[in-house]
Amino acid sequence: MAAVEVNDLTKRYSLRSFLARKGTEVLAVDHISFSVEEGEIFALLGPNGAGKTTTLKILATLLKPTSGTAKVAGYDVLAERDAVRKSIGIVFQEPALDTRLTGRENLDFHARMYGLPRSERKRSIEEVLSLVELEEYADVLVSKYSGGMRRRLEIARGFVHRPKVLFLDEPTLGLDAHSRRRIWSYIKKLNEEEHTTIMLTTHYMEEADFLCSRVGIMHNGRIVAIDEPEKLKSSFTEDILTLEIAWNDRSEEEKAIEMLKKFEFVRDFMQKEGYILLKVHHAEMHIAEILETASKVGLEVKSVSLRKPSLEDVFIQLTGKTLEEW
Ligand SMILES: Nc1ncnc2c1ncn2[C@@H]1O[C@H](COP(=O)(O)OP(=O)(O)OP(=O)(O)O)[C@@H](O)[C@H]1O
Ligand SMILES: [Mg+2]
């Protein structure tokens, strides 16, 4: 059974603020369909405003879709709201802890809301505190926690009632590299050791790449590509080959351009700060030929480097811009 099943889902917001023109609407989610299998870590990757949070909120029954259907843990998000809520945990993009309480008190409050009996509550709280390595800080006020510690506590809280599916909205937003890696390891642990299905949103390419079995790239409310990170990378972009050429005089620039135009395996090329960047499919198979031809036409190649495409390159190919440019 799929843990999450989304079919032709749409969410339209109407903007009724006095600043907005009458009738202005935003199509935040635009006819998306996808599913997440049990036991997967799945990410929606996309820039600000892509529709990631809106999608998660619909799945968590916090927002009603405009049209389409969605099921979580086998339950319909509209018709079986309570059953969905019992099956999920959610960590919001915006911090949602009570900073006047300790870490343990925050967890306890949450566990009570889910109706966990006393003994189970105690055991589960100890376990999740140890999972995110906050045992020592359990009885410290959350107002004294660092940003990374708060995020860890939120993940612990999202899991304290042992949901089948855990939704994480931008779990590492704004954290430093070290805290981010720690959170990644907890997410992996929850998935591998507790068999929790995890669906997260992120705009960090490396996060989606490192954690996820599959990634959906979301852009302007649509899912423009969906696959395993490796497959996305290999099916969408060429390798990037960088040549450093000794530019002794201007005629060499023309020679280089002439040479590159003749190779049918060179999909595209550009000059950048004295280097030539080539987009080549399976570049490693063509390096020898490029070097040989360069030497024949009298070009001195000082260095060659080959880079495999990243998810960032895939994103640029699909949307025409880098994530930061959106
Ligand atoms: N409550 C709302 N009312 C009106 N428009 C909204 C509302 N919430 C979101 N939007 C709009 O819907 C679109 C999608 O927003 P959403 O928050 O789902 O994107 P996101 O991918 O989560 O972005 P971010 O990376 O910034 O969190 C945006 O254009 C946003 O301005
Ligand atoms: Mg968001």
Image (cartoon, rainbow, N blue to C red):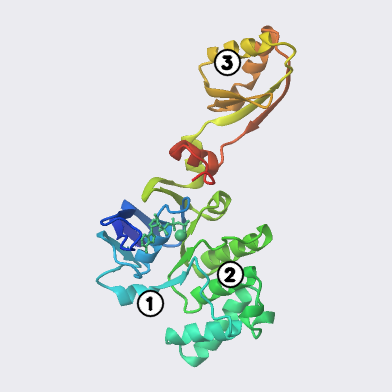
Q: Nearer the viewer, residue 253 or 238?
A: 253
Residue 54: where, in percent of width, then height? Answer: 38, 61
Circle 1 sits in a helix, a strand or a loop, which is it?
A: helix
First reached walking from the N terminus: tag 1 or tag 2: 1
- Marks 3 and 2 sit apart, C-alpha to C-alpha, by 50 Å
Q: Determine whether 63 is above or below 239 in the image.
A: below
Q: Is residue 261 above or below residue 65?
A: above
Q: Position of residue 127 (x, y in %)?
A: 58, 79
Residue corresponding to mark 2: 151
Dot 3: element: helix
Which structural element holds mark 2? helix
Badge 3 amino acid = Leu
Q: Nearer the viewer, mark 1 or mark 3?
A: 3
**317 to the left or right of 5:** right
Task: Check disc 3 and report the residue beneath it.
Answer: 260
Q: Is residue 9 left or right of residue 134?
A: left
Q: Which residue is mark 1?
A: 86
Q: Residue at x 65, y 13 (%)?
A: 253
Q: Is residue 90 left or right of residue 210?
A: left
- Can residue 218 be seen in this snapshot? yes
* Badge 3 or badge 2: first in the primary sequence: 2
Query: Between 319 and 38, which is closer to the camera in this rendering?
Result: 319
Coordinates of residue 144 in the picture (x, y in percent): 67, 78
Query: Ligand 2: does it lie within 8 Å of the C-beta at label 1?
Result: no
Q: Quadrant of residue 177?
A: bottom right
Can see residue 40?
no
Image location (x, y in percent) of residue 321: 49, 39
Q: Is mark 2 within 8 Å of ligand 2?
A: no
Numbered mark located on residue 301 in the image: none
Q: For the residue marked with disc 2, what is the amino acid?
A: Arg
